[in-house]
Image (tube, rainbow, N blue to C red):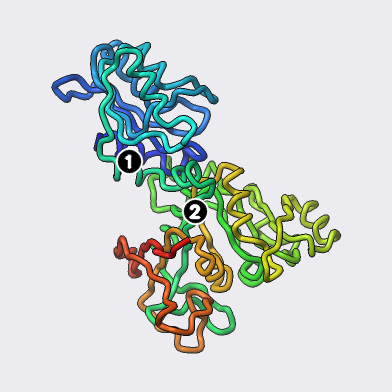
């Protein structure tokens, strides 16, 4: 199963909206006779790839798969049927399908066919492969990850907005990997107007082997601009570059501005406004889930990132900390209306590691939703 997890990780940038899954076919002595992983949506699932690799050697042997074999037909046939047809004797699964409408049905189909079923095995590690897919299937929402770069004194930009570059090349390459594993990248109109970012995945900037980087960049995330009154310039870089761009606004937006952005190639979507008159972030996340987004990355300024945090939408925080001091007049990491120690927002640091000359801190939020 540990090897199957390693294989599943190879699909981290390419399988969405499907889950990342790995599969091993082994004999009773533990010798691997076939292996495979799901590479991208529309292509063979992990079980099909592993069975193809094993050939006739699959019959009478054991399949180890990180996720319950599917029992329904989509772009490909049910994997449970493929395992039954191949004649495997036993299936060991890492975790059940998180979709409540199909969970357990693939396992039951295998049992009904006389195949021995065991599991879950290494369930926590298998779940870690697909946090966004699991959240979308169970809650109807994508996993939300914020990314920020700051100095050691917790500042992200000078008071003027100047921010290039707080962190070094290694950290910026790591951000490309974060984008590549995301179904959507969200930013705010102020970031678009001030920094004019592209927000696409650039293979040449990824710290990966060329073939893997090219595969990751081939599937660009949806670029999302939160723009309540449609102030996005029609010539902004984020509307160019071949990747899709969604501008999310409210009914208060000017129809002429909407027409200009649509002419520039953007999709403009009107969503309900919150109490503050701005785009309702909860409704935005529901919409992205409807569009089969598993993981979304918020790359924005302190105001929008802070609002996602304050409203309890953030699952994971990633901060790149540079060995620099920007001073007390520079801009903070999050704009949050916290005035008392008792109102602090708790987080749990899950990982901290050096990335070039900088540090990457990964934390999960403990905010009650």
Give x and y (percent) for residue 221.
56, 48
In front: 10, or 46? 46
Q: Which residue sits at x=27%, y=31%?
A: 119
Nearer to us in this view, 34 or 100: 100
Specify the quadrant of the image occupied by residue 291. top right
Image point (65%, 48%), residue name: 244
Instruction: Work out whether mark 2 precedes mark 1 in sequence or the reverse, and give the earlier one.
Output: 1
Q: Which numbered circle lies on residue 126?
A: 1
- In the rendered structure, find residue 148 and report the number of the disc placed on it: none
Quadrant (top left/top right/bottom left/bottom right) for the N terminus: top left
Q: Which residue is mark 2?
A: 179
Residue that protrudes farthest toward the left in the picture: 29
- Under tag 1, what secondary structure? helix
- Mark 1 is surrounded, within 10 Å at the Cα level, by few (under 14), some (14 to 19) or many (20 or more) other residues, namely many
The quadrant where residue 237 appears: bottom right
Residue 65 is situated, as x and y percent measured from the top left of the image, at: 32, 30
- Side of 337 where 324 appears, left or right: left
Query: Front-most of 284 and 103?
Result: 103
Which residue corresponds to the image point at 54% horizontal and 42% vertical from the top-left? 219
Compared across the picture, whether 128 is left or right of 234 comes to left
Nearer to us of marks 2 and 1 is: 1
Please tell me whether residue 309 is drawn above or below residue 92 in the rendered image.
below
């Amino acid at each position: 199963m540990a090897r199957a997890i390693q294989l599943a990780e190879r699909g981290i940038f390419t399988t969405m909206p499907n889950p990342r899954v790995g599969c091993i076919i082994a004999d009773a002595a533990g010798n691997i006779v076939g292996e495979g992983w799901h590479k991208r949506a529309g292509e063979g699932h992990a079980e099909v790839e592993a069975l193809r690799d094993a050939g006739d050697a699959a019959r009478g042997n054991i399949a180890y798969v990180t996720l319950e074999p599917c029992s329904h037909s989509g772009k490909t046939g049910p994997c449970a049927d493929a395992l039954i047809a191949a004649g495997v004797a036993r299936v060991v699964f890492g975790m059940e399908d998180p979709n409540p409408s199909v969970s357990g049905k693939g396992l039951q189909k295998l049992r009904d066919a006389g195949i021995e079923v065991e599991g879950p095995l290494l369930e926590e590690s298998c779940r870690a492969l697909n946090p966004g897919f699991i959240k979308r299937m169970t809650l109807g929402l994508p996993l939300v990850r914020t990314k920020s770069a700051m100095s050691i004194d917790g500042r992200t930009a000078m008071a003027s907005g100047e921010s290039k570059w707080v962190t070094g090349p290694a950290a910026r390459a790591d951000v490309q990997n974060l984008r590549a594993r995301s179904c959507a990248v969200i930013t705010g109109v102020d970031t678009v107007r001030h920094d004019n970012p592209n927000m696409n995945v650039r293979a040449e900037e990824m710290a990966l082997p060329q073939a893997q980087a090219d595969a990751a960049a081939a599937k660009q995330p949806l670029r999302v601009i939160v723009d309540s009154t449609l102030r996005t310039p029609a010539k902004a870089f984020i509307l160019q570059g071949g990747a899709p761009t969604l501008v999310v606004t409210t009914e208060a937006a000017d129809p002429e501005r909407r027409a200009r952005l649509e002419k520039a190639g953007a999709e403009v979507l009107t969503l309900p406004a919150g109490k503050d008159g701005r785009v309702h972030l909860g409704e935005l996340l529901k919409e992205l889930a409807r569009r089969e987004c598993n993981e979304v990355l918020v790359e924005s300024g302190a105001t929008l990132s802070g609002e996602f945090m304050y409203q309890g939408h953030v699952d994971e925080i990633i901060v790149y900390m540079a060995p620099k001091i920007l001073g007390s007049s520079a801009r903070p990491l999050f704009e949050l209306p916290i005035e008392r120690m008792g109102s602090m927002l708790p987080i749990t640091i899950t990982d901290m590691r050096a990335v070039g000359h900088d540090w990457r801190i990964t934390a999960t939020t403990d905010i009650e939703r």
